[in-house]
Amino acid sequence: MIRVGIVGASGYTGAELVRLLVNHPAVEITLATSRQYADKPLSQVFPHLAGRCGVVCQNLPVEEYAAMADLFFTAVPHQTAMALVPKLLAAGRKVVDLSADFRIHDAAVYEAWYQPHTAAELLATAVYGLPELHRAAIKAAKLVANPGCYPTSVILGLAPLLTAGLIDSETLVVDSKSGTSGAGRGAAVGTLYCEVTDGFRAYKVAEHRHTPEIEQELSKLAGKPVVISFTPHLVPMSRGILSTVYAKATKAVSQPELDTLYQEFYRNESFVRVLPPGALPATQYVRGSNYCDLAARFDQRTGRVIVLSAIDNLVKGAAGQAVQNMNLICGLPEGQGLDVVPFFP
Amino acid sequence: MIRVGIVGASGYTGAELVRLLVNHPAVEITLATSRQYADKPLSQVFPHLAGRCGVVCQNLPVEEYAAMADLFFTAVPHQTAMALVPKLLAAGRKVVDLSADFRIHDAAVYEAWYQPHTAAELLATAVYGLPELHRAAIKAAKLVANPGCYPTSVILGLAPLLTAGLIDSETLVVDSKSGTSGAGRGAAVGTLYCEVTDGFRAYKVAEHRHTPEIEQELSKLAGKPVVISFTPHLVPMSRGILSTVYAKATKAVSQPELDTLYQEFYRNESFVRVLPPGALPATQYVRGSNYCDLAARFDQRTGRVIVLSAIDNLVKGAAGQAVQNMNLICGLPEGQGLDVVPFFP
Amino acid sequence: MIRVGIVGASGYTGAELVRLLVNHPAVEITLATSRQYADKPLSQVFPHLAGRCGVVCQNLPVEEYAAMADLFFTAVPHQTAMALVPKLLAAGRKVVDLSADFRIHDAAVYEAWYQPHTAAELLATAVYGLPELHRAAIKAAKLVANPGCYPTSVILGLAPLLTAGLIDSETLVVDSKSGTSGAGRGAAVGTLYCEVTDGFRAYKVAEHRHTPEIEQELSKLAGKPVVISFTPHLVPMSRGILSTVYAKATKAVSQPELDTLYQEFYRNESFVRVLPPGALPATQYVRGSNYCDLAARFDQRTGRVIVLSAIDNLVKGAAGQAVQNMNLICGLPEGQGLDVVPFFP
Amino acid sequence: MIRVGIVGASGYTGAELVRLLVNHPAVEITLATSRQYADKPLSQVFPHLAGRCGVVCQNLPVEEYAAMADLFFTAVPHQTAMALVPKLLAAGRKVVDLSADFRIHDAAVYEAWYQPHTAAELLATAVYGLPELHRAAIKAAKLVANPGCYPTSVILGLAPLLTAGLIDSETLVVDSKSGTSGAGRGAAVGTLYCEVTDGFRAYKVAEHRHTPEIEQELSKLAGKPVVISFTPHLVPMSRGILSTVYAKATKAVSQPELDTLYQEFYRNESFVRVLPPGALPATQYVRGSNYCDLAARFDQRTGRVIVLSAIDNLVKGAAGQAVQNMNLICGLPEGQGLDVVPFFP
């Protein structure tokens, strides 16, 4: 049994890691940390876990818990992660970091969007944990930077088009919509039930921090620098991200060609479902699962390709992908513990 | 592998059966029937099942499909079930019937609340499928009448009190609240999103058909006829039932005594979680799982006991309990395929 | 024009008072206080009010603002109100207090459920502001204690029955359900969108502070002490309260008799809608309005009467009733400014 | 009093017209037609209207009801409207048509997106009823084509930019999101509560019929043909549309210049609220009102302008705008009956 520790277990991502890991046959949760809920059973913080997880939250310094697990999920805010991760690695542990701290390869770009980086020396070895694109590197990694939720949906959606050179990357517009769990479990007026329900809004227009992360990965795929317009929106739902992406096609393409391109690109991927012709993704069909559902349309009138990509932000956009990465770096079957069927209705 | 057939697969209960069964290690779905969606893959009717279930819906007479499975879940409306079930039994099949047709032992009572019964001869052998109360009988049964969703929550909530003789059954008031999936997947104005959201209402006040079913089981537990007031309500949510039950205590009882009574009664039950002192059930903590969460309070001011009982209406209130019953009548471990962790948030 | 001040304007009740008052032809809002949002325009705290209300929030001691209005709505927590209200009255102002501080006539009862009362001398002159029952006294009052949201729904629902002596008050069970706005606008994990949506729960079972308030008013109506079981629940919706009330009838009564009793009792009330035979209240049909919708059923099987009562907790349960009270104590037409049609869907 | 008739009163738009008109001081509803609910009081079809509207639904041929009102709102599906409207005009009535039948000036374009037009001769005299852009023409009209909900949000959002020539219309991407009431009140599986809640999806990608309507009006503003990519999405909420619009700026523009452009353009408009710098529209802040809330951002990184536009689809996107148009063609104050404050939370 692999011993795993969850650093920052009292957020929604922490709870989701527990949901997936307690049914994982090869791992055992040996640590859950939380400052706010120290000494409380995790099943008291999250009553849905009662009877399924006996772990008690601990508030320990990293030095004390580094020996308590073989692999750590660091589900803490950016800037907090960069203080912990180097110590865990130094102690010989493997780390799947769910913060933004090790996603951006270029420290200068990171610092332009976030704040100074105190562990920039690790950026060269951290692997961007999108298995569908970087599987081999992940398998060999000690530190995996688990992708952001929005980036996961966008990058998987665009990879076939950019790889094939089918779209003009200068025309990329990314309009994404997320459920409210993405805002975390902190007490805040803006995410109260009454503020969110029966309403819809954009936020951080042209300034969301997932922008450089998306651009970095799209640039790799395109083989040249890609700059995008990215607008996130808040949907009155708990979970799910749908990204709608627009770009001018570099040449006219038939709808069947587009369908084939996607089917071929993801032929061997068990967590990407390219939808049958005519169908469109919906977040309610991936809820609770590690799937990314995709469809692409060619609009002859405008010469644009429109890509629709749906994930569960807490699963493929966070905890599920983290488990997928853990499986890879631990030499386990990639899908182990992730066979959860989407939860509908 | 046990071959199972789902008769009436295109409702929410059918989909939920599939969600649970595709991860069940000992069974294989060999049939799904649907009149409305004949010849459509089930994964087209329910896109969340894509990649997880290759079954195609069929519209066949019972005579033709009776040989296609060893055990049938009949997830059809009452009155439809009584026409199918006798034929399946005659063909030597086992049946877990999710309709109301075989839940009421007394045909006269059934006919007073429903309509004439055409298979009343089976009522004597049908077993009321609440495993926590009737496990032995279920194991020996050919036909299990899977309990209604409201009755499951109420009967499990009251069993300890009635068995202990702690409440005056003439004072029983049952106030239940259900999510909208309980109304089914039929197109209807009353369950449109805009009609249900941001609203709350009672329905079928003092005339809901689950009343005699609840009374039958409570009467067995009390050892004498029990008559209740039962009011169901519609909650703007997809899943979940919370029942709030009131009764005069026959004697003063301390809260710790009450807690112990419940803990003891359900000590060996893996799907009933008696909450720790001070905690109260919430439907969001059982969502997607086969759990029934319970708490009881003694109110000294009024001399009443108040019981709170929460289930997921589609799981412990329907498909999950049906799988639990299947496991029992097929000699499988009772919880097999039912280790789904509640889905929160 | 009557000058009105809103003390505690940055909660949901404060915003609702503004929504109603800006269209009221006889009043003008001259003050809005808020500690948290001092010096911010109210339309920045509540962007929906942009263009409709130019008031800027002020953080002033009561001594400084007492002269700034003729009538004050004190929409502050209990205990805060008892410190302000005596000073406003001493300054010759009229007060509609939306806290609990002046609702309970008996200081000992208040102190048993809340905390010590520092202005108990005012309890004798404060009038319980339920216009349908205490209209004359309200008209003559200087201080109106605006009823709680749950009590409004329950008392209006039971008044005809208790007045007619038709129910046994010892058998009263009150099961109430409220939208989330009732929990206020304070940042708290428990009322985050993700914690509330797709879930349902009871809270403060047998210990909610509205219990003595309800009992006080029901006792007046019954002419003898009434003790009730009261359970509040949290519904995943913004607004609305539905109360389901059960009591044994003292004699058999026909459904038409019951309908007539209610129709007669509320014949002259413009804000109580007794529903036509067969119809049941739903909170979505009173949303945004000052209506209380009522229906009563006699259940012959159990001998119980079941009453259903629906209000919008922020309107008839708070701000709307406060405006109704203001109209009465200021000699204005009772319904002025309250002709808002319910908002559906 | 102007007598108004509502043809097709039993949909959500019909109900919303009634909500607004019963408080309108200059009109009286003299007719409501409905095939489905013939002879039913409208307050039975829509219980929230109880006590506010005594009209009974009638199922009459247009010939019989044409004399029953001075002005008609035709809230019927496209194709149905084109059969009724000519007869109402021939009878000397004024018409505000809420269908799509008279919005497209070019019959060929209409027929390419809809079906053959049987009253194309009226297209030349029908006025596109967006008062902020076509006020003078509306005042003189007999037939006003009330704009679609999506087009209202998009056209108001882009008018300042296109008029000023600030954006390259070939780069226009329109990503819109709508509440579920836009899908109407017909019984359908796709809009059931359980299908819509906690989910988000796009629909009719690159083929929604509002596309040519938007393009027509944008082309007028740009002074040349405009072709757009338009993607509508379904949000789990009842009401509201948010449109997010992207276009390349023709030159660099400062954010204050952009703010001023919008403030100036809509300086005299009482139903358009250009938000203060830094604020972003949210549908919950316009809910129930006739407002359109707007913000525009210039993104220096990409050279794009991003416009956010929020309306209530049933008010400014349908019934409210229809009343505004009625006021104009009847010589009433433009905002009469429309002073409803947004409904939040």
Image: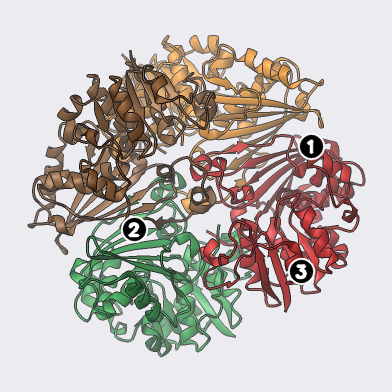
Chain colours: A orange, B brown, C green, D red
Q: Amino acid at mark 2?
A: Val
Disc 3 is placed on an element classified as strand
Query: Of discs 2 and 1, which sits in the foreground?
Result: 2
Label 3 packing within 10 angstroms: few (<14), some (14-19), many (20+): many
Q: Residue at image x 56%, y 65%?
A: D40
Residue A65 quadrant: top left
What chain letter is assigned to the residue under label 3?
Answer: D
Q: Position of residue B86 (x, y in %)?
A: 30, 28
What chain letter is assigned to the residue under label 2?
Answer: B
Give the distance between the C-alpha atoms of the residues marked 2 and 1, in whole angstroms: 61 Å
The disc placed on residue D303 is 1
The disc placed on residue B205 is 2
- Judge by depth and name the residue closer to the eye, C246 or C119: C246
Same subunit, tags 2 and 1: no
Can you identify the residue that label 3 sits on?
D71
Same subunit, tags 1 and 3: yes
Give the distance between the C-alpha atoms of the residues marked 1 and 3, in whole angstroms: 48 Å
Q: Is residue B105 left or right of residue C265?
A: left
Q: Amino acid at mark 1?
A: Gly
Q: Earlier in the sequence, mark 1 or mark 3?
A: 3
Q: Position of residue D242 (x, y in %)?
A: 66, 48
